[in-house]
Amino acid sequence: MSKQLDARSRKPYYWPRLVIYVVILILLYQFFTSFSASPMSLQSKNEKLPWYKHHHPRLPQYNPYATTNLTTQEREALTSQMVERASQLVSRAFPEMENKIIGSSLSQDEVVQFRSLVDCWTSTGKWVRMDGEVKVMSHYQDSLYGKCDRKHRGEGQREALRYVWQSKCAPIKDNMDNSVNEDRWCEVLRGRHLLVVGDLVQYQLHEIFLDAFRDGPTVCFGELNCRVSS
């Protein structure tokens, strides 16, 4: 009697176990056969993807264009080569650049005279300390630049701002006003896109433009990411 009860109690678990075993065998078969795909299956895959004509190799771990593995001398030599190559391409595309300023009506003599004057303004001169209050332009573009002014706001003008650059070369006109005529500048630049390319001096020129011609407080995080703040 007890044997019959044991057989009846085991009977309901027989079919579920059998189904589980069959499913496990099917999964194992699919797992092992996936590693050995036949050429016919690869060909059929390529037919479904006609742009996949051949196997694409993985990307190399070593980037031949990276400069992290170069020495300082090698990087300087590479930079000089790239600058020379860029200069050659620019000269080929704009052969008149050596004799004039692109987009201007200046003659060759006027260009040479103007460039020599700019070099004289920026390279020959000295910093002179002024006794009275010096009128300076407030900087609104970057909070880092105005940090010292905000810190010493109640102490009067800082010592560093009392020095003014005096060049040995005179301005273009003797009666030239040092202030910026915003209306005239805005009229000249209206509808134009201004691209400033160069080193730190050119970046400062970019900041000066934003300071002088702003319509309101401006926050700038780079040449292409300037926005008006509230």
Image: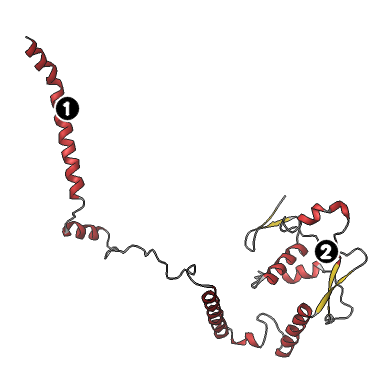
Give the percent coordinates (x, y) of residue 128. 87, 72
Report whether residue 134 is seen.
yes
Tell me if 49 is positioned left or right of 166 in this view: left
| Residue receiving disc 2 | 160
| Residue receiving disc 1 | 16
Number of residues whose C-alpha sits closer than 10 Å to that of mark 1, classed few (under 14), some (14–19) or many (20 or more): few
Residue for point 74% across, 81% down:
119
Q: Amino acid at mark 2?
A: Ala
Q: Is residue 100 above or below residue 141?
A: below
The residue closer to the viewer here, 47 or 56, is: 56
Residue for point 51% across, 76% down:
74
Number of residues whose C-alpha sits closer than 10 Å to that of mark 2, classed few (under 14), some (14–19) or many (20 or more): few
Give the percent coordinates (x, y) of residue 158. 85, 59
Tell me if 35 is positioned left or right of 203 in this view: left
The residue closer to the viewer here, 152 or 98, is: 152
Q: Is residue 216 above or below residue 13?
A: below
| Secondary element at image label 1 | helix
